[in-house]
Image (tube, grey):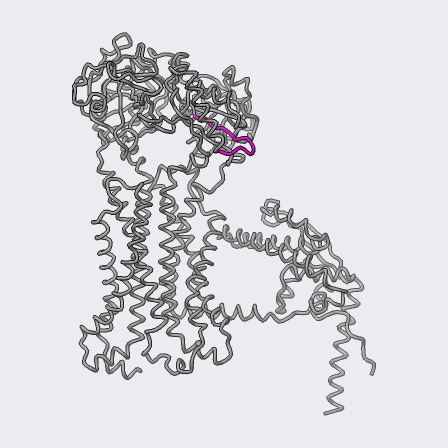
Amino acid sequence: MSRSRLPPLTHLQFLVLAPLLAAEQPGRALRRELALHGVRRSRPAFYQMMGRLEEAGWVDGSYTQKIVQGQIIKERRYRITAAGARAWTETRTFYTEASRFVGRAALVHG
Amino acid sequence: MADGLDWLRRASLALPADVRVRIFEPALEDLRADHLSELRDNGGWRVVRAVGFRLSALMLLVHCAWIGLVERPHRGSMRGWQQVDAPRPRVVADTLVQDARYAGRMLVKHPVLTGLAALSLTLGIGANTAVFSLIDALFLRPLPYAATQDVVRIWGNMPGGGGVAMLQLSVPKFEYVRDHQHTFNAVAADLGINLTLTGLGDPAQVGGERVTANYFDLLGIQPLLGRTFVPEEEERGAPVAVVTRSFWLKRLQSDPAVLGRAITLDGVPHTIVGVVRDLPVSDVARTEVFVTRPFALPGLTPALREQGRSFLRVTARLKPAVTLARARAELRLLAEQYQRSRRSAADAGWELAAVSLRDDLDAGLRPSMVTLLGSVGFVLLIACCNVANLLMARFVGRRGEIALRTALGAGRVRIARLFLIESLWLSVGGAVLGLLVARAGLRALPSIAANLPLQAPIELNLTVVAFALGMALMTGVLVGVAPAIQAARPASADVLKDAGRGLSGAGGPHQVRSALVTCQVAVSLVLLVGATLLLASFARVQREAPGFDVTHVFKANLSLPAARYPDGESQNTFFDALLGRVRATPGVRAAGLIYGLPLSGWEARTPYAVVGGQTVPMSARPLGLLRTITPGYFSALSIPLLAGRDLSTRDRADTPPVVIISRSTARKLFAEQDPIGRVVYLGPKDSGSSTHVVGVVGDVRSVSLTGPNDVEFYVPFTQHPYAFATLAVQTALDPAIFEHTATTLTRGIDAQLPLNQPGALETLVVASLGPRRLLMSLLIVFAALAVSLAAVGIYSVLTFLVRQRTTEIGLRVALGASRADVFRLVTGEAVKPVAAGLIIGLPGVALLAKVLASQLYGISAFDPLTLTGATLGLGLVAMVACLGPARRAARVDPLVALRAS
């Protein structure tokens, strides 16, 4: 059996990139998504993490403007890059294979 | 972006660029979006939400600063961040949330105690917030002038005889100071006037100011539109005007073409050259229009002007690095130089005094506000004692729980934190409800004190909300610290066994509770004595006879524009015509006119001397009040004529000058001799000013209800013409109804002449008592609050004591104690702390007496009757509070009590 190398993403990064596979998302929506999974990060901590993802080339960030209650809000939006999608797929493959490995080990030693 | 965060964005420029762009800006926009969405979905509590939003934004900046300046320099590669980006357990936060939930549940489980504690803190914090709002509106808000600390007012002081202070300056004296001083950047003058506005609907009287051209520049007031005056306009007395923003909005409907528009003031078209913001009411009353020609006092001849007729309010700005002390020293020198150069002037002997602008505006109300702030602080202290008492009592009942927690591994800090969180819940809840109480109290304010110099009705603002939350945090820690310390003490195994047995009650916690009761009683005594003194003082002031009849008297001010009434003859012709029509109206008993209605704040003073008496140089002559009247005035106000005759139509411009004096004046000038026929000098020069005394009338409280009777002279309009007067009419009708009649009669003579401030004379008297009434009312409320809270405190302490000592009481009864013995036992537990509180409160009462002495009238601050009454009253309340628990204890069934243990 050949084992995959270790995944390139942490579980938190994996969680954040998942919604981006479907479509571009605003930062607020990603934070809400994390909160649904019980992960609450302060805004600076969250955007710090997204900044690192941008530095790694896994997401692209951009600003759009929208109007809320008569005031202009600059919304930060993120789009997953091809490299990011590949890193996500690699991570998912790793965990899939690792779970099959545990099953086989149980059969051998059972 | 109108979100009030420009200061934050400017501060964020100090962050590293990538932190600002990648982290701070998106996080801030995220926060803004959440805040605006919340406001859209749930629009209540906007002020609280705004405070929370700004605090969150500030925390965001602090966090980004931490990331940018501390974290980032110590981190390595991308891989090194793996740990940081993984979710980590938040131990401290989780236990905090746990404790907060538990504390909330415990509070809900004891609704009576929680309700009492929350109510105490609501009332305490609410009262503090209301008073702080008042103080914020009156004193703390910055004046809309540049560098206010450098602006001073210059007044005249009359030393020695007369001893009158805060006198306005004459034109020559103002010009002398302006031209010879070296400590001020600029010196300006202004004169408050009423102007008749016509051509914009019904004629109206508007508040105005005549100012020198440099007035706005000196104060640093920038125009909102257009410009302010230039020196040439002041020199030639140009008909130009600067209006306030409220004038522009209200009377010109925010006309965009306001600049260059003409308005008619006193019959003369004035061109509007600028619009300025509304200036503080405490400084310029309700002025709406500014015009030039500050020296154009109606009736001021060049001779009178040179003789020192004083009417200007003078403002100056200190040069940089010049202190007020140095400016005062220079003014003393200038006053002496002026006296040497103009010996014969009426104001030659006056000293010059400089007062900072803030002191000038605040001085009158400051003592009352200090008293209020101290009182309301006491109320909060009592509320905190109450709540601490209640929490301590609960602590006794939870000792078993605490011992169990300790046995299971909870640290002392965690246990103490639990109690602190409970008290913070109470205090924050109390603060939130207290804001509602404060809001209701502020709404009721105008009905208690209508005369306060407030720009607008007081609303809760961010400063006040922040104050309330700060109070909440402080009180939460204050009330929670004693129970928390007690709770954190090491528990013994015995406590686990003894918990709930009912044999405890004495010892540490009980002593602390007794001490709290003592503190409450002591502070309540101080407040009660203060409230009683103020109430007694107010009652005396109200009983003080003003010297004139206030019922059924209508009054209204008239201001005759110079354009249509240029001289005394035209003015008196109008007054005669008006009085004739008014007197002919059915229901009118008497009518007259006066310049300087008592308690109106309008007053004129004149130097005087008795002819044939001791020779006094003009500059050293005392000043007396000068009232200009028509015949019929004394009848209208029911001021009794004690000797001689009233003024009549025989007293004209071409007949010898006459004067009527008050009884106090007659005693002061002529002792026991008959004053009728005697001659006095009235005015800034002797020649031509000999005036014959023709009558004596009763004393009138002209300046204030509590002030001494001033020297007062009444002279006829026909001999001392004046364009301003107050119509006084004694009528069988309700004075409020007479307003319509008076307006019709006035318009019947001059359709362009409005009445100003028409109403019942009684309102003047009521308004003059406004600040006193406010202080007294609030102190009564606070004293009642304090006494109630103290009673609740005593009641709750005894109730818990009885509950804790039920077994002991049962034992005593079983061993032969009577119900009376038990009753005495329980009440005896209250007598000691209450008696101690009453004794300890006495030094506080002595201190209060010093503070209140200047605000009392007709009663000593150490009045023995008040002190005794308050002490006995509070003692009685305390004993009544004991009755319930004592009777309950006396009814304890020994069998039930012993079986329960």
Residue B531 screen position, x and y as percent: 29, 48
Q: Nearer the viewer, residue B308 or B671?
A: B671
Q: Is residue B810 left or right of residue B452?
A: left
Residue B659 screen position, x and y as percent: 24, 17
Q: Nearer the viewer, residue B559 or B786?
A: B786
- Relative height, residue B212 to residue B68 (above, below): above
User: Is B647 included in the stretch rendered in magenta?
Assistant: no
Position of the N terminus of chain B by quadrant: top right
Position of the C terminus of chain B by quadrant: bottom left
Can residue B159 be seen here? The reply is yes
Q: Is residue B456 left or right of residue A23?
A: left
Q: Nearer the viewer, residue B692 or B792?
A: B692
- Relative height, residue A56 to residue B220 (above, below): below
Q: Is residue B885 left or right of residue B259?
A: left
Residue B784 screen position, x and y as percent: 29, 53
User: Is B318 included in the stretch rendered in magenta?
Assistant: yes
Which residue is rendered at x = 25% and y = 70% of the image?
A: B826
Q: Residue furthest bottom?
A: A110
**Residue B355 falls in which quadrant of the image?**
top left
Q: Nearer the viewer, residue B286 or B829?
A: B829
Q: Is residue B495 left or right of residue B14?
A: left
Give, as a single range, the part of the protein colored magenta. Answer: B313-324
Residue B558 screen position, x and y as percent: 34, 22
Can residue B299 be seen here? The reply is no
